Amino acid sequence: MSSDIAREKAKPTESLHLENADSNGVKLDKTGLPLVPQPTDRKDDPLNWSPALKLGICMQVSFLAFIGPLAAAVLNPAFVQVAAAFDMTPVEASYELTVFLVFAAAGPFLVLPVANVFGRRPLMLAAAVVSGVTNVAAAYSPTWAGILVTRVFNGIATGCLTALGPPVICDVYFLHERGFYMGIWALFVNNGVHVAPLLGGPIAQKLGWRWCFGIPGFIQLGVAVVIACCLPETLFSREPRDDDIKERSFSDLLLFRSLPVRRRIRLHDFARPFIMLKYLAISLPAVYYMTCLAYGSVLFATTGSVVYKEFYGFNVIQTGLILSIPLIIGNAIGEAGAGWFIDRLLFLHAKRHNGERPPEARLDALWFALLLPIGTIINGVSISHSETVSWVGNAFGMAIANVGFQVSTTVVYAYCTDCYKPQSVEVSAVFNFFRQIFSGLVSFYALPLAERIGFQYAWLVFAFINIALLLPLAALRLKGQKIRESAWQEPPTFHNDI
């Protein structure tokens, strides 16, 4: 990070806000620390946009990340109805979700490189339209094969929308702000699947299972109209440019009138997300985070319909409530103390270390992520002792786990994109792949293991897996900066103008 600041000081000394610049022309934040990255003097630089416009962009990409997973999960309570409609078992009906998860994980690798050449906006707009159209098409599909085909394209589109959120946040916010706004995005992306059970049961019971596809689909098409009118292009090249290059107006940013960067798509661009796996500051957090999603959220969703019917006698609507409300509350509490806190940790570290702001300072907040395995253990013990422990203890465990889950999401996304900001698209693609694939496997082994060794011991195993994979991040906190600066972890050179 110190080298980044040194490079920023070497830039031209002109500034739109001289009162916020030091004697060398380096632009400063309100605390007197250098802005990272240094904004240009151009009005089409997203870093120079108004706070209201930036917040609007943040909320749009956050809602896109929210509605996609919600639309995918809202059908879950209606698998019995779907099975009856197509003369199959509920397990076979759940394969539509499996197809979605596989293509949500792998599909973005095929299209995300476009975002670094033609911009974020064209891909997000296209993905939003495809998401809506494929959900509406599924609602009217007369065949099961037709529904599965829509899940393929819906998964690719939803995966792209999820993976593009963090790069857009990095485009418009400075280093010292990213934790807070990345946390907003993380709150939305985590709660899509948590809100889904609240809606899926009543929709299926009152309107029929097809509307579990239709209603989210029409909402997504409405959102596509909004972003077509309100979401500007945020990709911006920071390489030195001639002063006579025309600044792009807001209408230019909406109408694709000029490419933000000068590069072409090459075949090796599609391999670059895999190249990022060689960096420990990416691969270790990605492996840890996939267990956070799996054992802090997906575990409860995939086992809940069986657990709450068998052990507590809940009906579909009651099951939807308990699989939604505790998790939403836990995520909200977790984010209330996560985003702003990791930005504060970065600031305090800078004050103690002559202005240096290494991303590793954010990892101190991961102590709170230990609430995830604690909550998972509480949940498992409550299930095993359901005859003496009410559902309240079970719900409390899920809420505690989701406090930790939310903290872990905000911290690891902010940390990894801080480490490799120009490669944020590739970083996000890696995280999307790990989180989707691993969470899609939980349903295959969670209940069988619990039936064999008991819920409390099965959930204990999952908790210890999560803790074990957290330990390498403690090593990153202590030695991460030295590891990133070592010769064998030499940072990538592609997209460094972003």
Image (cartoon, helix red, strand yellow):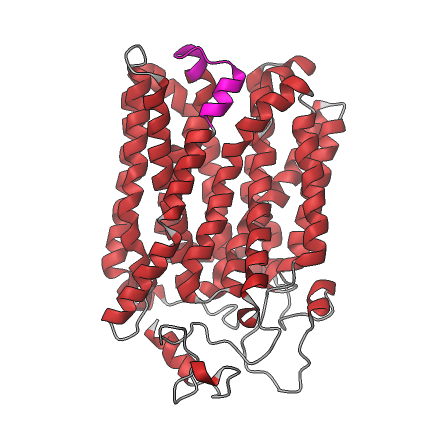
Q: Quadrant of residue 122?
A: bottom right
Q: Is 387 or 76 nearer to us in this picture?
A: 387
Q: Position of residue 355 (x, y in %)?
A: 30, 74
Q: Residue at the location (36% across, 50% down)?
A: 338
Image side of residue 14 versus residue 380, left or right: right
- Answer above or below: position of 14 versus 371: below
Q: Is 109 or 62 nearer to us in this picture?
A: 62
Q: Quadrant of residue 142?
A: top right
Q: Residue at the location (73% across, 50% down)?
A: 225
Q: Position of residue 56 (x, y in %)?
A: 59, 57
Q: Quadrant of residue 282?
A: bottom left
- Answer above or below: position of 268 versus 104: below
Q: Quadrant of the N terminus?
A: bottom left
Q: Position of residue 320 (x, y in %)?
A: 51, 23
Magenta residue span = 308-323
Q: Residue at the location (61% across, 28% down)?
A: 96
Q: Can residue 360 be seen here?
A: no
Q: Can residue 207 be seen here?
A: yes
Q: Is 337 or 165 nearer to us in this picture?
A: 337
**Count of numbered tags:** 0
Q: Position of residue 465 (x, y in %)?
A: 30, 36
Q: Is residue 312 magenta?
A: yes
- Secondary structure, magenta segment, majority class: helix
Image side of residue 219 versus residue 470, left or right: right
Q: Is residue 210 magenta?
A: no
